[in-house]
Amino acid sequence: MSQFLSSLPLWLSTLLVIVLPTLVAMAGPVFIRRKFGLERLAANNEIAGFQFATVGVIYAVLIAFATIVVWQRFNDAEAAVLQEAGAAVTIYRLAAGPEPEIAATRDALNKYLKLVVDKDWRQMAVGEESEEANSALNALYATATRISKKGLLSGAITEEIFDQLDSITQARRVRLHLAAGIVPDILWAVLFAGAMLTIGFTFLFGAESLSAQVVMTGILSVMVLMGLLVIVSVDHPFTGPVHVDTEPLDNALADFSRRS
């Protein structure tokens, strides 16, 4: 469900996560008032107010925790892409020379980044990975190994190339892992159940003005569901309108073109 909601346009996610549930929530006090009457509900105000304060604080802590976690992991995804691009540029600069094996390494690196941009990003949007990019990364390792075996570059440079290749691999694994989603299913269940219970608790109050109670319920619903929308939007860092883009890798490819 979170993958589906993350992939939607932001206006549609807002409609499904905030607008429609809020309209339903605002109808709740009206239904409960007609069923139980003002006097019975007003008798709950004192004890319900105390309990609602506790419920509200608990849910606020929970949603704040989830928001911080997903935002940190979203930043981790951005950092992984920057690390991958930086390592690629370093390899391209270190692999300098006219030898066919060195030129093949630069070509393999260029091909890998293009496949990452063209294929990997599309696959990550649905929580998967590109097998073509996997093969291109294997080919890149193979060309670098040939350089090492023939001793075409100094030992220090060759070692640094492999260190940067390892950085590319690690960064790619990080972004592929995060693409599948950050928030576990059990936490999603708790977040949505907590939202329904927190908003539904307002139905037990008996304000003298029904219209005022409906408006207050609507405001609370919007505030709670906006927090959920933020979490939904960044739960899959490479999916939907709020996503990590390919700009660092595009810049690396542009740098390769200028140097070729």
Image: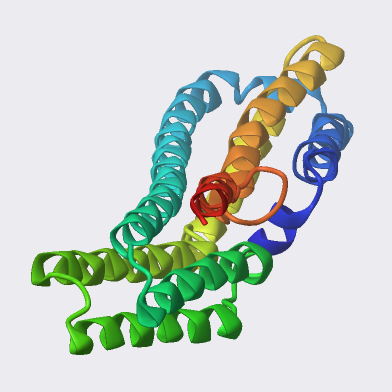
Residue 102 in the image: x percent, y percent? Answer: 36, 74
- Residue 252 visible in this rendered orientation of the protein: yes
Res 201 seen here: no
Foreground of the two, 175 or 163:
163
Task: Point out residue 239 in the picture as x, y percentages from the top left corner.
Answer: 66, 56
State the image quarter where residue 210 is shown.
top right
Residue 219, above or below 31:
above
* Rendered residue at 66%/29% (across/down): 202
Residue 147 image position (x, y, % from top left): 27, 82
Q: Quadrant of the N terminus?
A: bottom right
Q: Is residue 238 left or right of residue 72?
A: right
Q: Position of residue 18 (x, y in %)?
A: 76, 37
Q: Name the residue located 71 percent from the left edge and 28 percent from the top edge.
A: 222
Q: Is residue 199 left or right of residue 179?
A: right
Which coloring applies here?
rainbow
- Say which residue appears at 27% left-offset and 86% top-offset: 145
Nearest to the observer: residue 57 or residue 222 = 222
Q: Horizontally, is 39 left or right of 194 in the view?
A: right
Of 50 and 124, the residue lying toward us: 124
